[in-house]
Amino acid sequence: MNSMKKIIYIALSAIVALGATSCNMEFFPYDSLEISKGMNTYKDALSYRVSIYSPLKSFVGSLRETIEDTRSDLFNAKADFGNYYGRWHSWQNDITDPEAGSVWYSDYAIIGNVNFAIDSYTKLIDNAEALGITEEEVKNIELFRGEAYMVRAMAYLDLATKYCAAYDADKADEPASGVPLPTTYNPTSDAASYPGRTTLNETYGLILEDISEAELAIDTPGVPNSHYFTKDAVLALRARVYLYMGEWEAAFEDARWVVQNGPYALANTPEAIRLMWDGDTSTENIMRVSKNDKDQGGATGGYYYINDQNKGDGTTPNPQYLPTKTLLDMYDKENDMRYPVYFETHNVKAGYEKADMVVFYKFKGNPSLRTDSRWNYVHMGKPFRLAELYLIMAESMAEMEGGEEDAAYYLNELRKARIKDYTPKTYGSLEVLKEEIRKERVKELVGEGFRMHDLKRWGLGMTRGVSQNTAMTHSAYDQVSVLAGNFRFLWPIPKEEMDANPQFAGQQNDGF
């Protein structure tokens, strides 16, 4: 089966599996909307809304994040790590590695799903009178369509940050620098009609257009821990996109609007920071992905960071990856309230060696999502958090002329919430300030999948951090260091896709 057909079939199966007759976001849908009949009523539109959100259960909190951070400078492979993601961690990955295909096909399955939704919702809106759909129902359908645009923007941004170079306005019109951009639901086996790669400007342009469409439809006021997209979530996503594009003023304005007008507050006590991750509840969660104990997606902290298969309660961890000493030394271990939430010290075995090691415990999982006493590491993904917006404001102001004082203010505000008895600092020079903002992104967002794209967009190389204990980690991989611009900062287009799509001839990322 060729890869474009795989995309089509995956998208179809996702649509069938994710359609539902219930709009209760606490549960996976178990009934389906028959695709051959399409959407013809308001009830169909309402039923399908759940299928827009359901992919987020696995989209946020998955190998998308795990690969990006375990191949970065932040983690060392344990000496007996079993080669899980080993080709990525060792920077030897190529076009045949299944993970590149898994993310590619999954993102395009999500895109196929929401393209079907957008097309169908538009048909219902355009034919509302003939179909007996009321004005109030049309308004609701417009909201559902806006939510679909948000998911599509998130999926295309994921593809752009992994399979494309960092945004550079001077190079963004280069041919095949972006990704294919199907915007309608049109399954086909005709290889001649498969889309090729677009430019990076076109890719980011569509992402921004989709966010604008979402903004027109989603005027729901933000509330902490919302399971649905709100106005604040729309602006938070756009602030992230503008940051990646180097549109500093626009990024700052969107982030500031949410900070100033939203009902959120930074978690500023040890219990509040722990509850944000162990309980998925926080005053700073702009959005969280709804799950219950039937949902197993998003087990981010399990097999690779903790992997307690003995007692199953986190007390006997056997992780594949360990945080580097370099990462741990970034924290004020006595006063930074994140440190005991993100890390715990346990006796760990590696081959014949045993030693007390600091293990990454940020994603222990939510106890309410466990099916028995054993940890399953499942948590509710958090697509947008207030802390990220403070980091966006700080970085954006540091890049704007005359913005150093404001940049320092926003950095200090985040640190004041996270570090006990913190005294706001001045940073001496702009370069020192920028470096401190970058360090704070690491300390706050570790494990959430931001690190590799941050290094790429900052034009920095990747040098693996120093091991906590070289007897416990994989010596060959501890020494990995690559220069900025290394071709493996980009993910390869999967081999099956290259083989199946004639439009992709000559469009593979350089080096693969």
Image (spheres, helix red, strand yellow):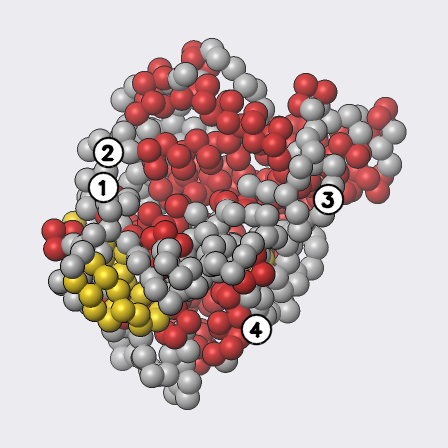
Q: CA distance from mark 1 to mark 2?
A: 8 Å
Q: Are circles 2 and 4 on residues that touch, CB within 8 Å?
A: no
Q: Earlier in the sequence, mark 2 or mark 3?
A: 3
Q: Earlier in the sequence, mark 4 or mark 3?
A: 3
Q: Earlier in the sequence, mark 1 or mark 2?
A: 1
Q: Earlier in the sequence, mark 4 or mark 1?
A: 1
Which residue lies at the image location 20% right of the left edge and 65% below the top edge?
354
Q: Quadrant of residue 338?
A: bottom left
Kind of residue at disc 1: Arg
Q: Are circles 1 and 2 on residues that touch, CB within 8 Å?
A: yes
Image position, residue 382 (x, y; %): 52, 57
Kind of residue at disc 3: Cys
Give the camera-side residue of 208 and 56.
Answer: 56
Label 3 secondary element: loop
In the rendered structure, find residue 23 and report the number of the disc placed on it: 3
From the image, tell me which residue sits under label 2.
Answer: 94
Kind of residue at disc 2: Asp
Kind of residue at disc 4: Ala
Front: mark 1 or 2: 1
From the image, tell me which residue sits under label 4.
Answer: 265
Image position, residue 2 (x, y; %): 40, 17
From the image, tell me which residue sits under label 1.
Answer: 87
